[in-house]
Image (cartoon, coloured by chain):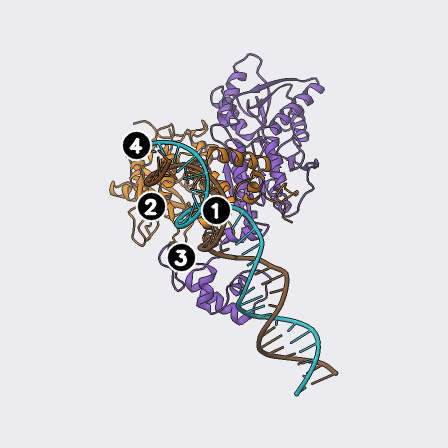
Chain colours: A purple, B orange, C brown, D cyan
Amino acid sequence: MKNAGRTIGKTFVSAQQVAERAGVSRSAVSRTFTDGASVSPTTRKRVLEAAEALGYHVNHLARGLIRDSSNIVSLIVADINTPYQAKMIEALTRRLQAANKIAMVINTSGQNANVEAALRQTLHYRADATIVLSGQPAASLIETCLNNGQHVILVNRDDPVPGPETIVVTNRTAARQAFDMLFRAGCRDLAVVASAVGSASLAAREKAFALAAEEAGVNVNVIRFGPTAYASGAEAARAVLSKSDRPDGVFCVTDLLACGFMDVARNEFGLTIPEEICVVGFDDIEQASWSSYDLTTFRQPVDQIADHVVGLIDHHPHLHTVQAPTRFSAEPVWRKSVRPR
Amino acid sequence: MKNAGRTIGKTFVSAQQVAERAGVSRSAVSRTFTDGASVSPTTRKRVLEAAEALGYHVNHLARGLIRDSSNIVSLIVADINTPYQAKMIEALTRRLQAANKIAMVINTSGQNANVEAALRQTLHYRADATIVLSGQPAASLIETCLNNGQHVILVNRDDPVPGPETIVVTNRTAARQAFDMLFRAGCRDLAVVASAVGSASLAAREKAFALAAEEAGVNVNVIRFGPTAYASGAEAARAVLSKSDRPDGVFCVTDLLACGFMDVARNEFGLTIPEEICVVGFDDIEQASWSSYDLTTFRQPVDQIADHVVGLIDHHPHLHTVQAPTRFSAEPVWRKSVRPR
DNA sequence: CAAACCATTGCACAGCTGTGCAATGCGCAA
DNA sequence: TTGCGCATTGCACAGCTGTGCAATGGTTTG
């Protein structure tokens, strides 16, 4: 089964075979592919030639077994085909690769959204870190991860848990700003469109907007429908616009909801935006800039977040202490779905 | 450093430690976590209890070292934040997990779109298979993969290469059908909107449509701009609609291009769709069904493709022979962007 | 009661790599 | 020339698991 000269069709080449072909010890091969190891230029060259000829590639499974780091980072994410999550995955994978790491993607959109099984997978493969982009992992699982030295990073969760690092966007500030936008545009009858299964981040936006409106003495109506998707925004629009006292300003906690809302408002109720009704979204997904929508919204600094997350991976945190969440500010993006003052 | 009783803070638990706590041999621990191995119910229970107490998880790196299979499948993809690719990734990751495999995502959107480095990564981690969703890997790299027993599956590439299995959509048939749609709607001055950097699949759609039009003696204009994105479709619309003899029917080789085209046609040129100009897209991304577009298009059977791809992984192909590509038919989805007959 | 069979279990090896330690050899200075 | 320092190299072990093989003990059958 084992032959040193040539691959026999469909088996991987090992360092031993490269060493025999190059006439050196296996250590020399290992050192050739290890940064900072001591190899003479002569043997290095011979090893590289033999490796190239045989098609050798270092086995990262075995390397990860020895070293403390496997260079695997796992991303736990639901709703991958959502524009916002897709953008986040793109940004993260790109930066991880630039840092010589590789991303494992674990999809928790299944029937029971089992983040637990996903976290187990990440432990199975000894991932250096786990980035949770959505879902609510049980605290017990997180503790297991921490006990095993796992590095857990939560993105967009507004409820700080002991141990993992948390990264959030300034949801409340932005939501108050959204109210200001609509109020200054003259809107006095407001609505918030959210989803029925929203995360803590989305709930925070909804609550903060409603609170700001109440403080200013402005009427505000909260509508929640289905999942956080286009169809839910459309359904919300049908529910709220068919009534006699329809709102003149709407804050959708997600751009996707806003797109659905705008389409129904225009195409089913014949309303013009922003003249008859103003709309503000959140996330700044690509579709928000399409000219059918031209949606005024808040930009999530996806690139900055990704930079920060990847920078966090190699730095080991203090265990079992509540880290203060790192906050990134969501900046307003002015377009045409809100009347100018 | 090594202590059998309890994790000392931040190191992983090994089977040895579980064995000592349960009072059995390490083999018993291994067999408890191996399907079909022979363990008595008594020891199995004791092992499971000890594993639970210590937080043990099988090290899949070491397991992959022994077995011929690592259960890792790598997805090589550019433009992850494109709706079509995101949908494909979602479908694939979901099915891979159902088959007890895990997905590594390699992003080749970087400056030089180096699929080669990506393929090397997949070799490093001994992936069971590599699914290439975009990009043009060099034939030499593919040969290296095949020599190492790698299973390469190409999706949406119309140029068959020796060795890897290929999965394509019936681009040509669908493109001819698109011409029929527009012709029967009375369009006699046609255009194809494509991108300047399109893949072979996109080129096939473009060519087949143009050919069908020529065969029918209908004038057709081919426009290519930038990357395959919304902005390119918009730019194409500005270029083609500002001329005096503007087309009355357009086939966009991608829904994203179609969205950009429609927005400019309506919002910048004041045209009505489908009365003044008919538009047909391709892919059936989610946005095509949004009521601002209501785009007549062709549905890529993403779920079927994903099923087939995942089913292909465990079945070893014949090497170095040109496999006939598996074809899936793209079915038309009738909406409102084409006039009824 | 004896023999045959079967399930279970432990030992030891394999799978591939990184690295400490000692040995080797070479160059340079005294 | 001799001694010292230094770069290089090979040996051997560690890291964690799966599994063939032999041994053990219990159960069933004649």
User: Is label 3 in contact with label 2 (beta carbons under 8 Å)?
Assistant: no
The dot on residue A114 is: none
Disc 4 versus disc 2: distance between alpha carbons?
Answer: 24 Å
Q: In the picture provided, is B195 more to the left or to the right than C5?
A: right
Q: Position of residue D30 (x, y in %)?
A: 28, 34
The dot on residue B204 is: 2
Which mark's residue is nearer the viewer, 3 or 1? Answer: 1
Which mark's residue is nearer the viewer, 1 or 4? Answer: 1
Q: Across the whole image, how many numbered discs are drawn on residues?
A: 4
Q: Quadrant of residue C5?
A: top left
Read off the chain for label 1: B
According to the picture, the residue beneath numbered tag 1 turns out to be B63
Which mark's residue is nearer the viewer, 3 or 2? Answer: 3
Is circle 3 on the same chain as circle 2? yes
Q: Is residue A5 above or below residue A175?
A: below
Amino acid type at circle 3 is Thr
Is circle 1 on the same chain as circle 2? yes
Q: Residues within 10 Å of mark 1 (few under 14, many from 20)?
A: some
Query: Could you tell me which secondary element the residue under label 3 belongs to?
Result: helix
According to the picture, the residue beneath numbered tag 4 turns out to be B186
Q: As rendered, which of A337 and B3 lies closer to the eye?
A: B3
According to the picture, the residue beneath numbered tag 3 turns out to be B144
User: Is label 4 in contact with label 2 (beta carbons under 8 Å)?
Assistant: no
Q: Residues within 10 Å of mark 2 (few under 14, many from 20)?
A: some
Q: Position of residue A183 (x, y in %)?
A: 66, 23
Query: Could you tell me which secondary element the residue under label 1 belongs to?
Result: helix
